Image (cartoon, helix red, strand yellow):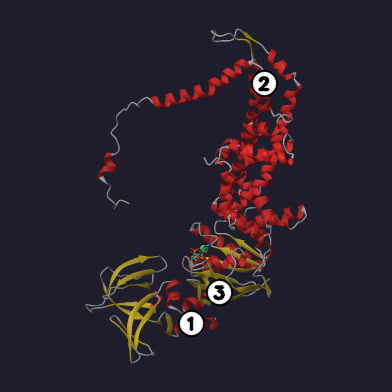
Amino acid sequence: MSAVPNRPSARTAVPPKRTVRQPFDWTGLLFALGLTLVIVVPLLVVGTWAFTEVWRYPSLIPQQFGLRFWSQTLARADVWNALFLSLRLTTVVTVLSAIICLPAAYAFARLSFPGRNLLFLSFLASHAFPKFGLLVAIAGIFLHVGLIATFWGVVLIQLVSTLMLMIWVPVSAFQAVDRRMEEAARDAGAGPLRVFWSITLPQAGPTIFAAMLMTFVNTFYETEGAWLIGAPQIRTMPVLMISFINNQLVVQYGAVLSVMLWVPSLLALIFARRAVGTGAFARGFGA
Amino acid sequence: MARLTIRNICKSFGSGFAVNDVSLDVENGELVCLLGPSGSGKSTLLRMIGGFERPSAGEILIDGRDITHLPPERRPTGMVFQSHALWTHWTVFDNIAFGLKLRRLPRADIREKVEQALAMVGLADYGQRMTTQLSGGQQQRVALARSLVLEPKILLLDEPFASLDQHLRERLRDEVKDIQSRLGITTLFVTHGQDEALALADRIVVMRDGVMEQVAPPDVIYRAPQTEFVAGFIGSMNFLRADVEDGVARHDDLTLPLPIADGPVILGIRPEAMSLTPSERPRAGKVHRLIDFGTHKLIDIDLTDGTRIKCMAGPDARAPRGLRVELGVSAFHAFRDGRQVYQTTSDLEATERSMSHA
Ligand SMILES: Nc1ncnc2c1ncn2[C@@H]1O[C@H](COP(=O)(O)OP(=O)(O)OP(=O)(O)O)[C@@H](O)[C@H]1O
Ligand SMILES: [Mg+2]
């Protein structure tokens, strides 16, 4: 080490003791403020509206708070029906998507078969086109086979939109699993399926859990497909909210519903932190 | 417990052969070391025996049964990977118990066997730890216990101690040897370290570019290398270019009787077969430096033809730098075209004689 002379620049690069005032990070502040404005303010406004009874124009804060619209909204049977329907739908879609996509993702990650790349691309391709056009096309097909306005029709359409996330993210998760671990399990006497279940899946677990959670939340809020295929019989929460806003010019109904819609995603997030721990959750996203 | 037979095994990964026409018999309870430079095909050979790589040609038999096309889970082999490949989402206990659970043993039996295995590798109290909470050496021992608990007929070890420090390696090496001979498991052991091979093996296989150069017990490999490569790879060996004329090999600093046909030859001389005497000759070799190993000293000598040779001397030897010396040789090997063509009979016979006297 000492035989290698230090380059002179390496010495002078260390500054003499001098107090340097850190320049104020204006860009950072502006950025943070901008983000706050875009994200928090609308949330705040909607949140406030949900608990407001009277709020007339020039005033900055509502004239009268109250829970009247909550009790009115919660008294409606269609709201509860929509909520339970949404939960049922979302669970079914997420579970089905996992059952279909995880083995497929594993195949993409570990096996090489003819047409692998083409097939992989085709999964992504469904997201390369404007979604609504695709949905209309699918709706046309569904009309023929009698899936329009049925539970399973909506399940199918929403399943299609989950494919990309549930394939792409798990593929990279599976690729990150040490092959030697799988080989060691084969060596211990486990067949390929058992290895997948006992070794590969738990190893890729946090990432896959994150992907499933995102799928759940995305599906819960999905409206276009649910509306196009499901209407008028199948009305999910977001679809109901849209029809409320469209049909009645009372802001509060929409506000109350949208506050209600925050609940599942909040719950999901809290659950995720509990179940996986922040570190693992972040690792799942490749941090 | 089992006998492993490998017949004309080849493996190519598209370009060239990683393993080329290897045949080997490993006897019941024998420990064979695979030794060779990086990329010589040791791992590939081992992985084919374990079932993780499909041979391009040839067959593998265990106790006479052809297992060439069986998947790993149906082979009676146990492999310890270089990277230990522990399942990090389970505890040490669960790691070792996994194979037993697959065999549907009763719970109590599993518990007992796992505890025995843990005790055997000296980790009795570590069952409930996660594998990531262990040191490298402990992880390596868990990997060993995980394989041993399943009582494989053939144990395959791929450089299991490569990432450990010298002391730990020696200790684990002795442990493995003890366990292996106690249980009588037929074992193939891949290693980079020739000292490891010499210390452990009943027989050593020296590999080079996918081909077996020599298969022999350690003392034979050391004392009677069949090729120049083996001679240079196992232990240290001084190589000198010489010319044979009328049954005498001539080099600037040496003249040795060598009853082979005339022509160029490469002389191989072990450091311990050399002796030095001070010389007045102006073109004699010069002492370059002296390294003291405590038990012996190693003297580097620069010859006038530019080669540097090593010479072993007793712990009290003295040789100031620059001293001119004459070389004495008590035993040597001669190589032509990479193959040994002659060796002085003294070493092997001498050891055999002293052994039979004892
Ligand atoms: N999966 C693979 N695909 C292509 N080539 C491979 C593969 N595995 C090994 N090889 C090649 O086969 C040859 C032998 O490799 P192998 O791993 O058996 O060497 P090794 O003797 O174990 O070396 P080391 O001591 O470095 O572990 C090498 O040239 C290597 O590049
Ligand atoms: Mg190797």
Q: Is mark 2 on a helix, strand or loop?
A: helix
Residue A121: image x %, image y %? Answer: 56, 48
> Which amino acid, by three-letter code, is at mark 3?
Arg
Q: Nearer the viewer, mark 3 or mark 1?
A: 3
Residue named by callout 1: B348
Residue A196: image x %, image y %? Answer: 66, 52
> Which amino acid, by three-letter code, is at mark 1?
Leu
- Chain letter of mark 1 equals B
Camera-nearest residue between B84 and B161? B84
Task: Establish if B192 lies above or below A193.
Answer: below
Q: Which of marks 2 and 3 is in front?
A: 2
Q: Residues within 10 Å of mark 3 (few under 14, many from 20)?
A: many
> Which amino acid, by three-letter code, is at mark 2?
Phe
CB atoms at circles 2 and 1 under 8 Å apart? no
Query: Please, which residue is most extreme toward the left here?
Result: B282
Q: Can residue B133 be seen in this view?
A: no
Camera-nearest residue between A210 and B176? A210
Q: Is mark 1 on a helix, strand or loop?
A: helix
Task: Establish if B295 lies above or below A31.
Answer: below
Name which quarter of the figure residue B280 lies in: bottom left
Name which quarter of the figure residue B322 lies in: bottom left
For the point 50% across and 21% down, the residue is A37
Task: Establish if A35 lies above or below A196.
Answer: above
- Chain letter of mark 3 equals B
Give the label on residue A244, or none. 2
Residue named by callout 3: B203
Q: Residues within 10 Å of mark 2 (few under 14, many from 20)?
A: some
Residue A36: image x %, image y %? Answer: 50, 23
Name which quarter of the figure residue B153 lies in: bottom right
